[in-house]
Image (cartoon, helix red, strand yellow):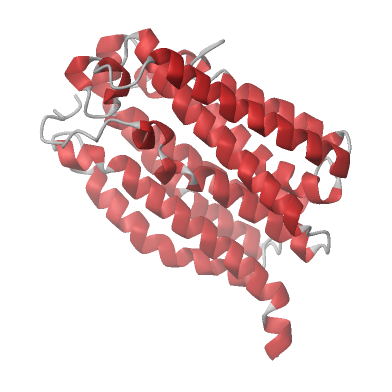
Amino acid sequence: MGPVMSDVKPVKAGWYNVFRPWTLHGAIVPVLIGGAVAYHDGKFVLPIFLLVLAGGILLQSAANILNTYGDFKKGVDTVENETRSPELVTGRLSPKSVLKAGAACIGVTCLIGLVLLVHAGWPILVYGVLGVIGAGTYTVCGSYKYLGLGQASVFLMMGILMPLGTYCAMRGDLFSMETFLLSLPNAFMITAVLAGNEMRDYEEDRRSGVGTLSQHMSYENGMRLYLFENAVAFPILAVLIILGYAPLCTALAFLTLYDLYRLVSNSRLASTDGRASFMLVPLAFKLNWHFGVLLTAGYLIQYHVLPLVM
């Protein structure tokens, strides 16, 4: 049984909440990882990197915007639960304008993709097409979120394909094993953010008949999945370092074990405390952001700072 959310303050309705800029670490961290490996390989091109970053942010924004639209059309967002997405249920924004904004983000991303295509060649087209499909069909034109595929999509699209796509945009290589391996810990953490979202909305989604992955589990098992996805990044990174697939300085990311401790402590209260349930997502955001930045920083320090001082 999930908690009552009545003690959580409603968000301020408007475009800021629709775009959800505080979620953009989900696009930024994967691009940083792919960019760092490309830099180490001597194929870093700053304007291309910035274009990829802009495209990733726009796709993440499109997914956020279209999620608001799709949840409203599906009947998930109602006046009764307007604390999370009040824009459409209160009439502050029109569904048509929100749909157009999401489509505009995808349209600009496609224009960026044309530039990347000229620079990197046909391999980048694979990542671009998959990214647009992933963002555009999350809650509309397929609505795979309601089929329980949201977490799998985040893991694949943002966790794996976005770093690989960033590397590809620099070098034109379809696949990079080093980028793939370095992206694995972060892929689980990004997925955990969505798991936290599903657990926060567990009771409301159940009443609305939303078929997220967590809805196919008990509340307790959904919470176990959330904790697993947040925590498993640490042993994965440890194995990568031990086997020599990640440099030792990426162990800087273990500093975020304190963030994990706070997240786990909060999760123990989430089933009965509305505020703790609400914090499932922000604490996962924070862990993912800190872990990803420290992982990337450690990678670059190992190869491009330590050689200068040793």
Q: Quadrant of the N terminus?
A: top left
Q: Position of residue 90 (x, y in %)?
A: 24, 18
Q: Position of residue 243 (x, y in %)?
A: 69, 61
| Residue drawn 28% across the image and 31% down it | 200
Q: Residue furthest left?
A: 7
Q: Nearer the viewer, residue 253 or 12?
A: 12
Left or right, residue 115 beside residue 276: right
Left or right, residue 251 beside residue 225: right
Query: Would you place residue 257 above or below residue 228 in this image?
Result: below
Q: Nearer the viewer, residue 200 or 177?
A: 200
Left or right, residue 169 beside residue 64: right
From this viewpoint, is residue 222 visible? Answer: no
Q: Nearer the viewer, residue 57 or 270?
A: 57
Query: Would you place residue 262 above or below residue 168 in this image?
Result: below
| Residue drawn 29% across the image and 49% down it | 264
From this viewpoint, is residue 272 visible? Answer: yes
Query: Would you place residue 148 above or below residue 176 in this image?
Result: above
Q: Nearer the viewer, residue 52 or 235?
A: 52
Q: Position of residue 294 (x, y in %)?
A: 52, 64
Left or right, residue 122 beside residue 133: right
Query: Would you place residue 190 above or below residue 140 in this image?
Result: below
Total numbered circles: 0
| Residue drawn 83% across the image and 36% down it | 117
| Residue drawn 34% across the image and 41% down it | 281
Q: Position of residue 79 (x, y in %)?
A: 20, 16
Q: Quadrant of the C terminus?
A: bottom right
